[in-house]
């Protein structure tokens, strides 16, 4: 068995990502390109596969697990422990550590989502397993499954949904799976993994990852169902399980888009949609032991629902637009950022705002209704003017600064003494005159409308 060298070459010290994990193995190398079902573990621990997994973990960084080990500490640890870990993986005795539980608020502030953060060693192993299993399962996945798959993303799902509506299917069956990642049945999932994987060591390892305890407040609880979000394997496992849903929809000839646990089926009438909703609910609950959230699911018009943050217009020639819920969520994030940054300079506030606005505008660049971007730009500038008005505090300071910004003395004093609140003044003509759009452009404020126009010009 190949072992990890005790010391790195000079080149590897300079560039840790080039570090190779163990000596080459002929069978393993053969298994990496065309791994046999019963010899997959050899492909998992093969040198090139593990080196690729290590690079991916280093690129993703991430928080430490329950053992406190950081990504930067992983490589020194592997120099000493990799021979033992590899031997345990090969003989099927490796035991994953518990995952650290982190609660994050759900969008809209309704409840929390549980994330499970594995140790960095387990993230490395999961990534290596994912790299071997993904090419095996990918060819069998549906053309209309878009989540967590190479070369696919939200854009493809959204454009496909738009194409369905444009073709005349102007009703949508919007299905929401209740706590999907918490409710996955382990036996049903493993049965589907075993369809294409016969290596018992890999199957045993995956099941152990599914059963790995959840540590919260210093206590470890055993998990009998669910696959915690946060590990590299979870997205692939979710697609393996829900592929049965995809195949059932294809068998029935339905037009659908699925992105992870978000699944929309497009039909031509409300009555047809209700029939589809009822039959698919029974299929999911009986065949996959998954529960449909009836409160969040609905048969409705596409322009009254959202899919991956987007909605559509009700025009004959439908257009994509940003869903109202997505606009509301962005505003809440911006308000929170402003609250946390009280007292800092306007420039620092804008600098902190820039990554959020760029990421949001990049995601929603496929929207075809520009009014949302224009309205948000005006709202953000008004929030910034509100900050300025609050920071001035005293009447004399407000009058003096308004005069410095070009207002006449009479108008400045009338504005400073109007008795209105900060938000009203932020939208009034005197603050718009003192701080026009060009002022914020000079400070580097991202204009969502400008980003939208630039994207439209390039497509």
Image (cartoon, helix red, strand yellow):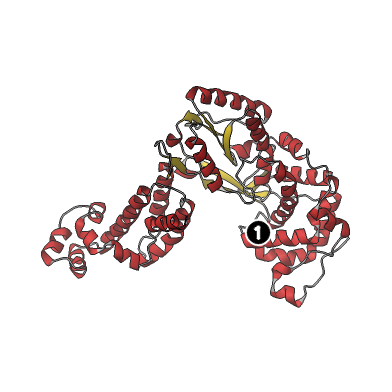
Q: Quadrant of residue 401?
A: bottom left
- The percent coordinates of residue 12 (x first, y second) are 73, 73
Asked where in the image residue 145 lies, by quadrant, the reply is top right
Who's the residue at 62% across and 29% down the image? 253
Which residue is depicted at the point 62% across and 49% down? 230
**Residue 2, image x, y percentages:** 86, 63
Which element carries disc 1, helix, strand or loop? loop
Q: How many marks?
A: 1
Nearest the camera: 365 or 224? 365
Residue 158 vertical position relative to residue 266 in the rendered view, above or below? below
Locate residue 210 relative to residue 33 in the image: left or right: left
Q: Mark 1 highlights which residue?
A: 68
- Residue, far left: 410
Residue extending farthest bottom: 10
Task: Tell me the quarter of the picture where residue 378 sits.
Answer: bottom left
Q: Quadrant of the N terminus?
A: bottom right
Mark 1 is surrounded, within 10 Å at the Cα level, by few (under 14), some (14 to 19) or many (20 or more) other residues, namely few
Question: Can the viewer see residue 390?
Answer: yes
Q: Residue at x 28, y 62 (%)?
A: 391
- Is 104 left or right of 432, judged from the image as shown? right
User: Residue 263: percent from the left, percent from the top?
Assistant: 57, 36
Q: Does residue 262 appear in this view?
A: no
Where residue 342 sits in the image (x, y, percent)? 36, 60
């Amino acid at each position: 068995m190949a072992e990890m060298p005790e010391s790195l070459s000079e080149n590897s010290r300079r560039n840790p990502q080039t570090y190779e994990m163990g000596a080459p193995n002929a069978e393993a190398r053969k298994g990496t390109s065309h791994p046999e079902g019963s010899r997959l573990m050899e492909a998992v621990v093969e040198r090139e596969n593990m080196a690729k997994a290590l690079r991916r973990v280093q690129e993703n960084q991430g928080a430490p697990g329950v053992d406190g080990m950081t990504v930067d500490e992983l490589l020194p640890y592997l120099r000493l422990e990799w021979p033992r870990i590899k031997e345990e993986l090969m003989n099927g005795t490796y035991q994953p550590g518990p995952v650290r539980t982190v609660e994050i608020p759900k969008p809209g502030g309704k409840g929390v989502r549980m994330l499970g953060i594995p140790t960095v060693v387990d993230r490395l192993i999961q990534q290596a397993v994912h790299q071997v299993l993904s090419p095996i399962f990918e060819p069998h996945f549906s053309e209309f499954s878009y989540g967590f798959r190479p070369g696919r993303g939200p854009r493809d799902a959204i454009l496909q949904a738009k194409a369905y509506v444009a073709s005349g299917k102007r009703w949508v069956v919007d299905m929401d799976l209740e706590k999907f990642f918490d409710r996955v049945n382990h036996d049903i999932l493993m049965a589907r993994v075993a369809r294409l994987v016969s290596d018992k060591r890999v199957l045993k390892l995956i099941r152990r990852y599914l059963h790995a305890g959840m540590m919260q407040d210093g206590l470890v609880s055993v998990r009998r169902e669910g696959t915690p979000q946060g590990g590299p394997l979870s997205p692939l496992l979710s697609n393996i399980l829900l592929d049965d849903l995809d195949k059932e929809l294809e068998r029935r000839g339905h037009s659908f888009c699925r992105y992870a646990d978000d699944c929309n089926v497009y039909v031509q009438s409300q009555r047809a949609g209700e029939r589809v909703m009822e039959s698919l609910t029974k299929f999911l609950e009986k065949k996959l032991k998954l529960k449909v959230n009836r409160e969040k699911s609905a048969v409705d018009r596409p322009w009254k629902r959202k899919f991956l943050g987007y909605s559509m217009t009700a025009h004959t020639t439908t257009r994509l637009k940003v869903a109202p819920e997505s606009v509301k969520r962005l505003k809440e994030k911006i308000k929170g950022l402003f609250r946390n940054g009280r007292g800092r300079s306007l420039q620092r506030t804008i600098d902190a705002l820039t990554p959020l606005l760029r990421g949001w505008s990049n995601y929603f660049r496929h929207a075809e209704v520009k009014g949302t971007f224009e309205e948000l730009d005006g709202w953000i500038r008004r929030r910034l003017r509100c900050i300025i008005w609050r920071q001035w505090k005293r009447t004399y300071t407000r009058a003096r600064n308004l005069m410095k910004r070009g207002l006449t003395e009479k108008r400045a004093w009338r504005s400073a003494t109007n008795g209105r609140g900060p938000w009203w003044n932020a939208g009034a003509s005197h603050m718009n005159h003192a701080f026009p759009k060009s002022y914020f452009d000079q400070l580097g404020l991202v204009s969502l409308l400008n980003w939208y126009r630039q994207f439209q010009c390039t497509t």
